[in-house]
Image (tube, rainbow, N blue to C red):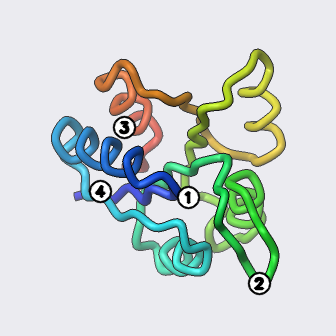
Amino acid sequence: MKTVLIVEDDLINARVFSKILTKRGGLYVKHTEDVDKVMTIAQNKEADIILMDVSLSRSVYQGKSVDGIKITQMLKSNSNTASLPIILVTAHAMAGDREKFLKQSGANGYISKPVVDQQYFVNQIMALLPE
């Protein structure tokens, strides 16, 4: 069974995503907003894909505040974790944001909140899951 790591500081969102992914996608879900845990899970290959909230309000790494873009950049710049697919999730979707965020972060995909079409949400994740 494939594992999705949800990096999200809003527990309600995390629960909603978890439910959709387990019920509709048949996926196993982990959730944390602890950046050290995210790094460990990624390095130990304990997740097949990451759903990364762009605006993590409480996340700190090595004493500095980091957002989802920064965490994605760190994962993508490390040869051990660079191939792990990362999908950015954001509620602040303005025109042009998608391209800017993807370019800045090196992420593989982008989903805006709230998730209206659950099947489309699952399909976007399935499409990026490694075989």
Q: Which quadrant, please, contains the N terminus? A: bottom left
Q: Does residue 94 appear left or right of residue 44 in this picture?
A: right
Residue 131, percent from left and from top:
37, 49
Q: Nearer the viewer, residue 128 or 9?
A: 9
Identify residue for label 1. Answer: 84
Residue 26, percent from left and from top:
18, 46
**Residue drawn at (56%, 43%) of the image:** 87
**Residue drawn at (65%, 65%) of the image:** 58
- The local secondary structure at tag 2 comes to loop
Q: How far is the residue under mark 4 from the one under mark 1? A: 13 Å
Q: Does residue 106 appear left or right of residue 37 in this picture?
A: right
Q: How far is the residue under mark 3 from the one under mark 4? A: 10 Å
**Residue drawn at (64%, 56%) of the image:** 56
Number of labelled discs? 4
Residue 33, percent from left and from top:
53, 66
- The local secondary structure at tag 1 comes to loop
Amino acid on which disc 3 is placed = Met
Specify the quadrant of the image occupied by residue 90. top right
> Which one is earlier in the sequence, the residue at label 3 or at label 1?
1
Q: Does residue 79 appear left or right of residue 83 in this picture?
A: right
Identify residue for label 4. Answer: 2
Looking at the image, residue 73 lies above or below residue 131: below
| For the residues bearing labels 1 and 2, Cβ distance under 8 angstroms | no
Mark 2 Cα shell of 10 Å, populated few (<14), some (14-19), many (≥20): few
Identify residue for label 3. Answer: 126
